[in-house]
Amino acid sequence: MLFPTIVTLWIIVDNLFVFRGQGEIENFPGNYSDFRAYEDSAEPKKLDSVNTEKNDWKKSNPTGNLTFNEQKEFQKIEREIKDLELEKTKIEQLFSDGKIEDKAIESKANELKNLINKIENKEERWFELTAKMEG
């Protein structure tokens, strides 16, 4: 019969990083008990003004009227168009260099045609999103 092993782990610290918010980090020399005692003895800070304004991602949204998913789609489409254009250029270069075997010409031509169709479809959606963004 096996008995479970209980392990007790004690961590001793002599230095704390206190995250105050707003990017402020304080290095406190001592352990947590020392820190609590220090905090309890200090005068409470009085807030002069409290900012209750809600920070909404839509207000600072550079992509206008697009939803979050449309923003992601817009960025994805831009990357996809770039990749498809690169593939198209490679195939066109093969044709212009004459490096395609006779039996592969038809398949490469079909591949190029499909790439061009994909690019056109992606560009059409990109224009739709751009128009919505500006509207």
Image: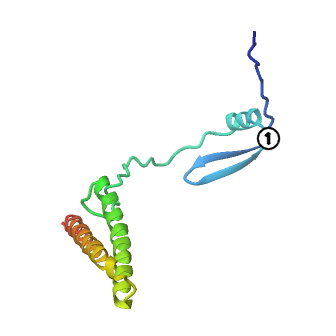
- Residue 111 lies in what quarter of the image? bottom left
Q: Is residue 123 above or below residue 97?
A: above
Depth check: 115 or 107 in front? 107
From the top left corner, tell me how far across and down residue 62 is, in percent: 33, 65
Q: How is the image coloured?
A: rainbow
46 displayed left or right of 26: left
- Residue 12 lies in what quarter of the image? top right
- Residue 3 lies in what quarter of the image? top right
Task: Identify the image quadrant of the N terminus.
Answer: top right
Q: Residue furthest front?
A: 103
From the top left corner, tell me how far across and down residue 41 is, in percent: 71, 35
From the top left corner, tell me how far across and down residue 133 is, in percent: 24, 65
Q: Residue at x 35, y 67 (%)?
A: 80
Q: Tell me the element at label 1.
A: loop
Q: Is residue 114 above or below residue 47?
A: below
Q: Residue at x 22, y 71 (%)?
A: 117
From the top left corner, tell me how far across and down residue 124 is, in percent: 20, 69
Q: Residues within 10 Å of mark 1 (few under 14, many from 20)?
A: few
Q: Residue at x 33, y 82 (%)?
A: 102
Residue on which the image places disc 1:
30
Depth check: 75 or 53 in front? 75
The three-letter code of the residue at mark 1 reads Gly
Task: Identify the image quadrant of the C terminus.
Answer: bottom left
